[in-house]
Image (tube, rainbow, N blue to C red):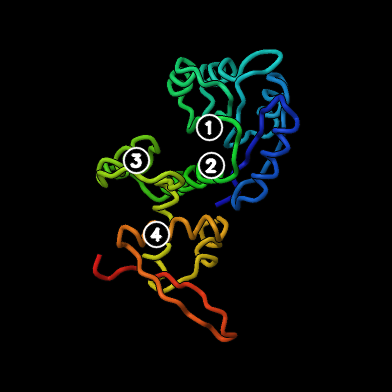
Amino acid sequence: MNDIKVIIAEDDRQIAEIQKRFIERITGFKLVGIAHEIKETEDLFEIFKPDLILLDIQFPSGTGLELLRKLRSQKNNVDIILITASKEVSTLKEALRGGVFDYILKPLVFERLQETLLNYKKQILQFEKIESIDQYDVDTALPRINNNYQHSNKNTRLPKGIDALTLEKIRSVFKETKGSMSAEEVGELIGASRTTARRYLEHLISINELSAEVSYGSVGRPERKYNFNANK
């Protein structure tokens, strides 16, 4: 799979630079342009034909929603992730009607953007592998449906600081490796810090999905190793 081509459309140059640095940290994505005006975004779109636009809503010369409507009216199939400070329900509704992949509120944090981009990449890979769909494919391909589906099946409310998608990534890591791992190793595999990984690992221990033991290693420094709970 080729790198996913991305354009940033953000009028605030400092915020655009932050987004640029975030994208550079995520494997599989290539930033091809940064625009600070609606017209500039349109020009970059025509030149680079990106797969994805990270789009703000408020610009001096118009709005991101206007651009979204224009692109859809022209039958352009570029995907859109809105990154905005707008908290109006009407704005969210219009964005969803326009077929945005996700809607992220500012201030943008790396983990939230990374989560969305990895889900986007996963969806593209999934579509490349299948010729026809069943209901499971639909439920896993649509993030909003997928989240609701997972939450209703688990019938539990996650504690503060624990995100369902990141939790599922960690579960997948253990299913694939079938071995014991440290928080640092898990963090590297999911693209998160050791502290973040440990928070999720300890949550999985609290619900009896993982167990842990202390390993002293070759240099004698104690290290906590996590394993799937075979009885779960």
Q: Secondary structure at mark 1?
A: strand
Point out the tag, 1 or 2, that comes first from the N-terminus: 1
Q: CA distance from mark 3 to mark 1?
A: 17 Å
Q: Quadrant of the C terminus?
A: bottom left
Is 183 rendered above or below residue 23?
below
Asked where in the image residue 212 lies, by quadrant, the reply is bottom left
| CB atoms of marks 3 and 1 within 8 Å | no
The residue under the point 55% across, 66% down is 184
Q: Position of residue 83 (x, y in %)?
A: 58, 30
The residue under the point 35% across, 65% down is 210
Point out the tag, 3 or 2, that comes first from the N-terminus: 2
Is 179 rendered above or below residue 7?
below
Residues packed near mark 3 inside 10 Å, few (<14), some (14 to 19) or many (20 plus): some
Marking on residue 112: 2
Point out the tag, 3 or 1, that comes first from the N-terminus: 1
Q: CA distance from mark 4 to mark 1?
A: 25 Å
